[in-house]
Amino acid sequence: MNMDILKDLEFRGLLHQITDREGLDKKLNEERVVLYCGFDPTADSLHIGSLLPILTLRRFQLAGHIPLALVGGGTGLIGDPSGKANERTLNGPEVVEAWSQSIKNQLSRFLDFSTEIENGAELVNNYDWLGSLNVIEFLRDVGKNFTVNYMLAKDSVDSRITKGISFTEFSYMILQSYDFLKLNEMKYCSVQIGGSDQWGNITAGLELIGKSTDRRAFGVTLPLVTKSDGQKFGKTEGGAIWLDANKTSPYQFYQFWLGTADNDVIRFLKYFTFESQEEIERLEAEVQNEPGKREAQKVLAREVTKLVHGGEALESALNITAALFSGDIQSLSRAEIEEAFKDVPSTTLAEDDVALIDLLISVGAAPSKRQARQDIESGAVTVNGVKVTDLEATTNQLGRLGDSYLIIRRGKKNYFLVQFA
């Protein structure tokens, strides 16, 4: 194989649990291994909590192995209790099918599914085998391999006993175990990876393979991603950070990573980028010696945004960032204006010509005409990147960006967007 994948994962802090390190190391160095990770369609997009296993599949593929990305079209109809305090809301087949297709499209950005290479990735959907199961045969042939005592001892189930867990979610472990067995039979898949909350489900799958076949299989879990300040990773005041550009814009995505704390940035560079050990160690020294430059954060934001959204979206995010930092917002395109200011207070004007003083009040930039006058006279107001001190200024005199917009800034950070109808 092309590289020592376990050694690389270890350097990056990505090996949380592993069932047989020595055995897996030997297998990975002797043959091309098929591995899989599952992604249940619980929304119409994956969020950055899924990036770690996705990029780990990519690392295995770059090392010469064959990744299977499993979309849980079947298990998504059931609901995984792992890491959840309460029962999930069940979604209908049409919803799960639509979400499954969206997730398939997203996974295609990260893995090479070409049939022209020896280790091309493959997308599989567990509804293909779970959807046609006969309940009597399933209980006899698969369910008999699991004792209730064994299942109750797993963390994903034990943590829910006090509040209660339905038989539906209780059965999830058996279905995921069956996935591993089917992929082992159909695709010669011998490794399952997942988050640390999947350890119980993964080891249950290994038990089923051991009882049903004479083949060896392995399980690997990745660490739970946490922030050093105790806040939940991947969440902002606006909600989750999604991989879908329509739900989290590339600019917002870039800014999320750019805001990474010094205490987290090197760990996240190891987790989420493909930078070399030498480059990461260099950036670690930069964090220690010149933290104000925030070079490590810039590399992190650039590399992850490019991975998820592509080079063109990254360039747009960089352009917006530079324009807002310098105040030269006139260089922004119409699309970039809409992306950069989608979350700022905005208003739509039906009138062509409005006095700036009145406009400041209507958009919420000033509470009164008196305050609006003071802000204009003191130079605290810029429109379209230009400071305005004329108390008689009107929107017709100020011009428009992209033929439709005025961007007002009061102070250093308070932006307001005006769109003409």
Image (cartoon, rainbow, N blue to C red):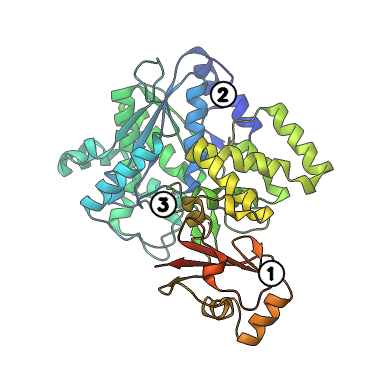
Q: Nearer the viewer, residue 296 or 122?
A: 296
Label 2: few (<14), some (14–19) or many (≥20) C-alpha neighbours in 10 Å: many
Report the amino acid beneath label 2.
Answer: Ile
| Position of 225 relative to 385 (above/below) | above
* Residue 225 visible from this viewpoint: no
Residue at the spot of label 3: 246
Label disc, if present, on residue 1 of the rendered structure = none
Residue type at mark 1 is: Gly
Label 3 with label 1: CB-CB less than 8 Å: no
In x, y percent, where is residue 240?
A: 49, 56
The image quarter in which residue 127 lies: top left
Could you tell me which secondary element the residue under label 3 belongs to? loop
**In the rendered view, would you say 108 is above or below 288?**
above
- The residue that mark 2 highlights is 5
Q: Position of residue 146 (x, y in %)?
A: 33, 42
Label 3 sits on what residue type?
A: Asn
Please report the residue visible at 43 percent of the width from the left and 54 percent of the height from the top.
Answer: 247
Secondary element at tag 1: loop
> Which residue bears the numbered disc 1?
411
Residue 372 position by quadrant? bottom right
Is label 2 or label 3 in front?
A: 3
